[in-house]
Image (tube, rainbow, N blue to C red):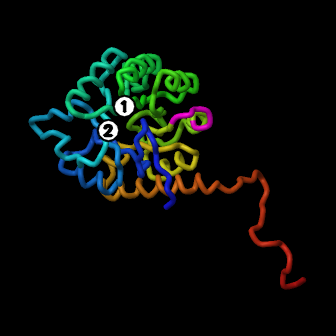
Amino acid sequence: MINDPLIIGGREFSSRFLLGTGKFSLPKTAEVIEAAGTQIVTLALRRANMAFEGNILDFIPDTVTLLPNTSGARNAKEAVRIARLAREAGCGDFVKIEVIHDSKYLMPDNYETIKATEILAKEGFIVMPYISPDLIAARELANVGAAAVMPLAAPIGSNKGLLTREFVKMLVDEIDLPVVVDAGIGAPSHACEAMELGADAVLANTAVATAGDVVAMARAFRMAVEAGRQAYLAGLGRVLDFTGDASSPLTGFLED
């Protein structure tokens, strides 16, 4: 494969598949991470302190970059507090900002997310905000120091696929930051589609964690992301409307 690193916050990664760990049993975590080939995993701070089950940090290889999220934050103030606690707990400077106060649809609050991103970027965090795919909000996030943007593909946990395709494409075309498609990706084919669209990376959690064989599914996502990236770099073939174009010339038939 050609040298094509993903660069976020000045760090280089060879894998473009990010894995969420929110729904895995802890004993499976390391095996799933290995199968996925991922180098960045998300985790909720509360899972880093679960005495009754174990600390998730004990199950994540040291070579993997931690991306703690601010799950549970309802506003910028709470997100900033969680991010600071995660850094103090030894999770590093990467942080995924999630600000959600809509308990029905679990849609991110872009306004509060921008506020939290600005504060944390000034404190040296490598901020990767989870957002509804809005071009104006994404531009403002770039202005205040985001290291990437993470637009949702569909409602979180829904496994419905790339429902926001056209809006994600706007971000890919217009934002000079890595675009990591997050939430709602439900199958390897969805991940491949996002990568073919030009996304820089894909994050999945529920689609892997709820599969019949989580290790095999993690491996399938890994291959799909790689295939989608290669297809994007190669340049997809044209699409024709209402016409055909034979791959072999329509001459030289036997009766001619």
Front-most of 152 and 19? 19
Q: Quadrant of residue 212?
A: bottom left
Residue behind mark 1: 96
Give above or below for 82 relative to 188.
above
Q: Which kind of residue does numbered mark 2 sit on? A: Thr
Residue 198, image quadrant? top right
The kind of secondary structure element at disc 2 is strand
Q: Is residue 127 above or below residue 225?
A: above
Query: Disc 2 or 1, which lies upstream in sequence?
Result: 2
- Residues drawn in magenta: 172-177
Tell me how far mark 2 sits from mark 1, CA to CA: 8 Å
Name which residue lies at 28% across and 19% down.
81
Asked whether 182 falls inside the magenta stretch, the response is no
Toward the viewer: 91 or 104? 91
> Amino acid under label 1?
Lys
Residue 84 location in percent, x, y? 27, 23
Residue on which the image places disc 2: 42
Mark 1 and mark 2 in contact (Cβ < 8 Å)? yes
Residue 186 marker: none
**Farthest-out residue, left:** 52
x and y, in percent, of residue 28 in the image = 22, 51
Expressed as whole percent of the image width and height from the top left, the position of residue 201 reads 47, 44
Position of 235 with respect to 252 (left or right) is left
Q: Position of residue 57 (x, y in %)?
A: 20, 41
Q: How busy is the neighbourhood of tag 1: few (under 14 within 10 Å), some, or many (20 plus)? A: many
Residues packed near mark 2 inside 10 Å, few (<14), some (14 to 19) or many (20 plus): many
Query: 141 left or right of 67?
Result: right
Residue at x-position 48% and y-position 48%: 191
